[in-house]
Image: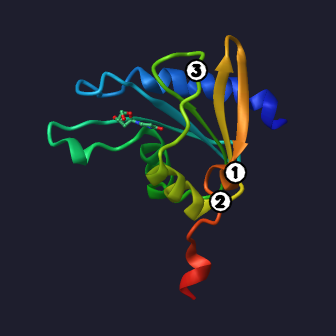
Amino acid sequence: MALLDAADTLLDQARIARENAHAPYSRFPVGAALLTDDGRVFTGCNVENASYGLTICAERVAVFKAVSEGVRNFRAIAVIGPEDDLPCSPCGACRQVLHEFNPTLRVIAPSGPGSSRVWTLSELLPHAFGAERLV
Ligand code: THU
């Protein structure tokens, strides 16, 4: 399936995942849906904590769910914030975590009523620090 065909479906899955967000402090629920190379989808939502710094973003929940299930070949991630029509681009920490597994990952976000846009992760995190620097 072409990525743009998959984009709407992934955004729908992110929207459903957002329903489980635990965001009583920010009131900023986020959902994410991560598409693997073999067509599986792992979803995530943000999970906040009364000790604010322990909060984890929706994107990292999705990545850690997948990796903990033995899956780490990722093709795209859709992210949706509180509003269905506005983009919610991943925070810097999530960009770094996504980069670990695929620097060319596609990041999908809504861009208006019924429309979406796609970034590559390297657009969002140019000159990233990565594993190649450590060897
Ligand atoms: N958040 C995400 O889950 N993903 C993003 O891309 C941006 C921010 C969460 C973290 C926190 O729970 C709330 O949104 C406000 O920052």
The residue at which mark 3 appears reads as 86
Amino acid type shown at disc 1? Glu
Name the residue at the top extreme: 113
Instruction: Name the disc covering residue 11, or none.
Output: none
Amino acid type shown at disc 3? Leu
Q: Quadrant of ligand 1?
A: top left
Q: Which badge, 3 or 1, is on the more N-terminal residue?
A: 3
Q: Which badge, 2 or 3, is on the more N-terminal residue?
A: 3
Give left or right: position of 126 versus 64: right
Q: Is mark 2 within 8 Å of ligand 1?
A: no
- Residue contact between numbered discs 2 and 3, judged by CB atoms under 8 Å: no
Kind of element beneath mark 2: loop
Task: For label 3, count other residues whose C-alpha is less than 10 Å away and answer few (under 14), some (14-19) or many (20+).
Answer: some
Name the residue at the right extreme: 2
Q: Is mark 1 within 8 Å of ligand 1?
A: no
- Residue contact between numbered discs 3 and 1, judged by CB atoms under 8 Å: no
x then y, percent, for residue 59: 48, 43
x then y, percent, for residue 48: 26, 36
Instruction: Name the disc covering residue 126, or none.
Output: 2
Kind of element beneath mark 1: helix
Q: Quadrant of the C terminus?
A: bottom right
Alpha carbons under labels 1 and 2: distance apart = 6 Å
Q: Quadrant of the N terminus?
A: top right
Name the residue at the left extreme: 50
Pick whichever, 25 or 70, lies toward us: 25
The residue at which mark 1 appears reads as 123
- Residue contact between numbered discs 1 and 2, judged by CB atoms under 8 Å: yes
Name the residue at the bottom extreme: 135
Name the residue rendered at 21%, 41% in the picture.
Answer: 52
